[in-house]
Amino acid sequence: MSAPAASLPGAAPRRSRPTVAALAMISDLMRHRSLVGALLIRQLKVRYRGSILGFVWTFLNPLLLMAVYALVFRFYMRIAVPDYAVFLLAGLLPWTWFSSSLTEGTNAIVGGSSLVTKSLFPTEILPTVTVLANMVNFLFSLPLLLGVGLFYGIMPDPLAWLGLVPVLVLQLLFTTGLVLALSALNVHYRDVQHVITNLLLLWFFLTPIVYPATQVPAEVRPLLWGNPLALFTETYHRILLFGAWPHLDVLGMLTAYALVSLVVGAKIFDGYRDTFPELV
């Protein structure tokens, strides 16, 4: 009988404590950063391969979404928000990064079976690369937001935009933790990928993206603190629309969400990793 992957020379051992699993996983990713970079570039190239417009879809997709939601909620539903197109785009772009990462990343291990079956391949790279690829698309879409903002007369504040750095890092950690957990669970329970698609639709409308948080009834507005994406969206609005730095209490809450997500996600992933080769 062959030895399990965790006992092979050079393979990462099973980590028992959640924090140990998360730190060791980050160390593994840093050690294999050249492989992460190569897979990231490949995924970005493959995304629009065979498409006539290619990379242009990075800008067209959010623009088309913005046009649809602006038509429905600005003109049909009559949501009164100044510069609604900018407001909408500032929430849609980070949401697209998050939702695309979850829908694509949930299937990362199953879809990468040819790599997973290699005994020494660090499987956490696959879901992580999916999150990073969608983050790159988000970053490439920021000039689009800047252009739409300038069209509406909103001048960017370079100092305030520096506040994006900690928010981006926190969203990266938070999203990666969720994707690690979901990709591992999806190997055993293939229903996960279908459930997450429907949950994301509900999550979208529970998040103040197409409407301002002020329209949430006052008696349930405190519940927004329990929705990490609501806090992320409000923070992006604060930075990109109003040129203000994030509130420290919001950053503190987002830091807690990010750390819990990463630690728990890494622990779940690490607990299932030995079963991946035989199930994919």
Image (cartoon, rainbow, N blue to C red):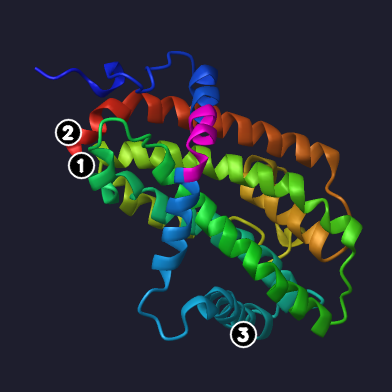
Tell me what residue is drawn at x 35 percent, y 48 percent.
Answer: 108
Above or below for 122 versus 16: below
Foreground: disc 3 or disc 1: 1
Label 3 amino acid?
Leu
**Residue 29 lies in magenta, yes or no?**
yes
Rendered location of residue 98, percent (x, y)? 54, 54
Secondary structure under badge 2? helix
Point out the image quarter for the C terminus: top left
Label 2 amino acid?
Glu
Name the disc covering residue 278, or none. 2
Alpha-carbon distance for marks 1 and 2? 6 Å
Q: Is residue 106 left or right of residue 165?
A: left
Alpha-carbon distance for marks 3 and 1? 43 Å
Alpha-carbon distance for marks 2 and 3? 49 Å
Name the disc covering residue 280, or none. 1
Which comes before the other along the chain, label 2 or label 3? Answer: 3
Q: Which residue is mark 3?
A: 71
Rendered location of residue 210, percent (x, y)? 64, 68
For the residues labelled 1 and 2, say whether their Cβ atoms are less than 8 Å apart: yes
- Asked which quadrant contains residue 91, the reply is bottom right
- Asked which quadrant contains residue 136, the reply is bottom right
Rendered location of residue 183, percent (x, y)? 36, 42
Which comes before the other along the chain, label 3 or label 1? Answer: 3
Magenta extent: 26-34
Outermost residue on the top side: it is 16
Label 1 amino acid?
Val
Foreground: disc 2 or disc 3: 2
How crowded pointer 3 is (Cα within 10 Å; few <14, some 14-19, many 20+) is rated as some
